[in-house]
Image (tube, rainbow, N blue to C red):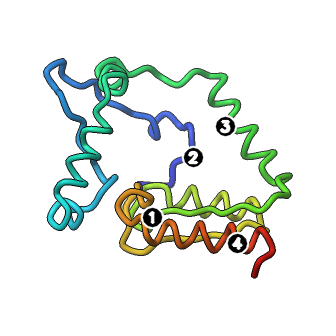
Amino acid sequence: MGIREPGAQAFRAIAPLDADVLFLPVGDSLTDTLKMQRPRMYERYLRIRSTATRLEYMRHPRERHPATLAETAAIAETITRVSSPMLVIVGALGPLVTAARRLHDLVPHSRYREIAASPHNVYYETAQAWNEAVDTFLTDAAGHR
């Protein structure tokens, strides 16, 4: 499968869920390691993910509005003007690595941190590594290092 641009129709393809589904699957948001080593955290995430609003959206998915697609393209064109410090952080096992690298490339002064062995929800499953990366970035941005 080739690289998909953010907002592309294939990027948002969602099959409607059956009305009897009560919990949304986590897909590649978390790893099997978390499920085995910390089942309670895994279950909490499953419950948080499965809010009524999200379930209803997944039962009745809608195509992205053309204005949203245009805004996505405009952001890619104007993001290069960001002058504030920026940290692009992503889980190495997540589906957004390519998009995160693209954002980092668009903002050359940004810092890029890919957390190894972490899924899409790196902040949840590997919170310590996430917090360390953010702490280092914020400390450096404040001029303390």
- For discs 4 and 1, the disc positioned in front in the rendered view: 4
Identify the residue at image location x=82%, y=53%: 82
Whole-Å distance between the Cαs marked 3 and 4?
Answer: 31 Å
Which quarter of the figure has residue 18?
A: top left
Question: Tags 4 and 2 in contact by the CB under 8 Å rule?
Answer: no
Among the two numbered marks 4 and 2 on one chain, the one whose residue lies closer to the N terminus:
2
Among the two numbered marks 3 and 1 on one chain, the one whose residue lies closer to the N terminus:
3
Q: Position of residue 77 (x, y in %)?
A: 78, 45
The residue pinned by badge 1 equals 91
Among the two numbered marks 4 and 1 on one chain, the one whose residue lies closer to the N terminus:
1
Whole-Å distance between the Cαs marked 3 and 1?
Answer: 22 Å
Q: Nearer the viewer, residue 142 or 75?
A: 142
Which quarter of the figure has residue 91?
A: bottom left
The residue pinned by badge 2 equals 5
Question: Tags 2 and 1 in contact by the CB under 8 Å rule?
Answer: no
Whole-Å distance between the Cαs marked 2 and 1?
Answer: 19 Å
Compared to 43, does 62 lie above or below?
above
Position of 104 with respect to 24 (left or right) is right
- For discs 3 and 1, the disc positioned in front in the rendered view: 1
Q: Position of residue 135 (x, y in %)?
A: 60, 69
Q: Amino acid at mark 4?
A: Thr
Disc on res. 72: 3
Position of 88 with respect to 18 (left or right) is right
Disc on res. 139: 4
Q: Amino acid at mark 1?
A: Gly
